[in-house]
Image (cartoon, rainbow, N blue to C red):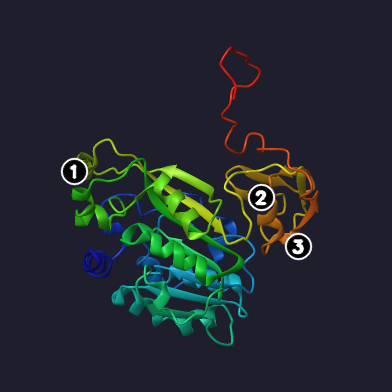
């Protein structure tokens, strides 16, 4: 399957128009601040883009970033503009044809973004073999990926090695395709379904378990959408399976709990993160309005207090008292409440 994916993205596809489904393409509105940046990316790089979402997290100035499955480098060059000349972006991909396109425009983009020298590097390799990269543990502030993890066989290895490469307080922010069930092996072996980012998709609960096993205790869903295949021949193959494109953020923070626990804490957003003057959206359930005291669970408190976002918030409360599961956020208490019966007690 590895060679099949190389051929599919290196030789079969020449542009996004060659894709047979919409699984690897996003219908999300482009943020206004990103449009002038992408307008400066070389046309050949843009033409070879096959992503499924926008992997553009907040507050990236000066960060060291690793892009898993960078392809021809569209996201790498966009990220390079956002981290600035003092930042660094490394693009990793296994497809020589794609990397050849990416690599030849390094100086071009340094000139376009008015840098004295390039701040990007491209490396050929497999994203489930990150242990082979020449970077020490904790080297990167941020790891991104755009619809690529579904294309590798050992997805657990990707998450484990990503956790190792991130510094404490670092983040993995990525888009990918997920399924509502585990996919039968005969469909996993279908080269077109696999190359179209469908049959390699993880069952969503398996993804959550793999993330936690890797060390990312509290995966946060940022945004998602239902995939409409819009290819009758492929729809007949997949039957009743449902697919989703989703963006997750995984933080490497010591002491995160497996559920949202309430310690009576709160935060207030200062409105100072670039392009986020009115609110900060940590994930799909935490849209924090500027200037308003916002109650948070212990994990969310840590995600804001022990990461690059710390200076943009005021923090209230401590860890002295635990009030149980956080209301409307964590797993509800499983026991009957306010009901008495004659069952024997222990």
Badge 1 element: helix
**Vertical placement of residue 197 versus 77, above or below:** above
In the rendered view, would you say 42 is above or below 116?
above
Q: Residue at x 49, y 52 (%)?
A: 247
In the picture, the disc for residue 140 is: none
Residue for badge 1: 233
The quarter holding residue 160 reads bottom left
Measured in 3D between alpha carbons, the distance from the residue under mark 2 to the one under mark 1, in whole angstroms, is 44 Å
Residue that mark 2 sits on: 300
Figure disc tally: 3
- Residue identified by numbered label 3: 311
Mark 1 → mark 3, Cα distance in angstroms: 52 Å
Can residue 250 be seen here?
Answer: yes
Q: Position of residue 167 (x, y in %)?
A: 59, 70
Q: Toward the viewer: 111 or 248?
A: 248
Task: Give 341 or 145, whichever is nearer the viewer.
Answer: 341
């Amino acid at each position: 399957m590895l060679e099949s994916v190389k051929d599919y993205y290196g030789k079969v596809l020449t542009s996004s128009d060659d894709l047979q489904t919409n699984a690897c393409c996003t219908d999300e509105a482009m943020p206004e601040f990103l449009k002038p940046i992408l307008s400066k990316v070389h046309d050949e790089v843009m033409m070879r883009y096959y992503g499924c979402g926008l992997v553009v997290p907040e507050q990236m100035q000066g960060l060291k970033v690793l892009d898993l499955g960078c392809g021809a480098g569209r996201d790498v060059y966009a990220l390079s503009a956002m981290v600035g000349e003092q930042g660094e972006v490394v693009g990793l991909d296994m497809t020589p044809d794609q990397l050849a396109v990416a690599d030849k425009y390094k100086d071009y983009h340094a000139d376009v973004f008015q840098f004295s020298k390039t701040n990007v590097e491209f490396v050929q390799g497999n994203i489930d073999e990150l242990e082979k990269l020449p970077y020490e543990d904790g080297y990167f502030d941020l790891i991104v990926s755009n619809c690529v993890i579904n294309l590798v066989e050992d997805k657990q290895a990707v998450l484990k090695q990503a956790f190792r490469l991130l510094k404490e307080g670092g983040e993995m922010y990525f888009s990918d395709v997920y399924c509502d069930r585990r996919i039968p092996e005969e469909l996993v072996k279908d080269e077109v379904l696999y190359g179209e980012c469908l049959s390699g998709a993880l069952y969503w609960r398996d993804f959550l378990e793999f993330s936690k096993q890797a060390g990312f205790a509290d995966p946060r869903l940022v945004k998602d959408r239902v995939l409409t295949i819009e290819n009758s021949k492929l729809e007949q193959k997949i039957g009743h399976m449902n697919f989703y494109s989703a963006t997750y953020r995984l933080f490497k923070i010591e002491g995160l709990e497996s559920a949202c626990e309430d310690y009576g804490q709160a935060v207030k957003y200062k409105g100072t993160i670039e392009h986020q003057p009115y609110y900060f959206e940590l994930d799909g359930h935490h849209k924090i309005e500027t200037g308003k005291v916002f109650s948070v669970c212990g994990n969310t408190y840590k995600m804001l207090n022990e990461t690059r976002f710390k200076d943009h918030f005021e923090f209230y409360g401590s860890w002295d008292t635990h009030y149980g599961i956080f209301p409307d956020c964590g797993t509800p208490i499983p026991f009957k409440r306010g009901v008495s019966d004659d069952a024997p007690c222990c």
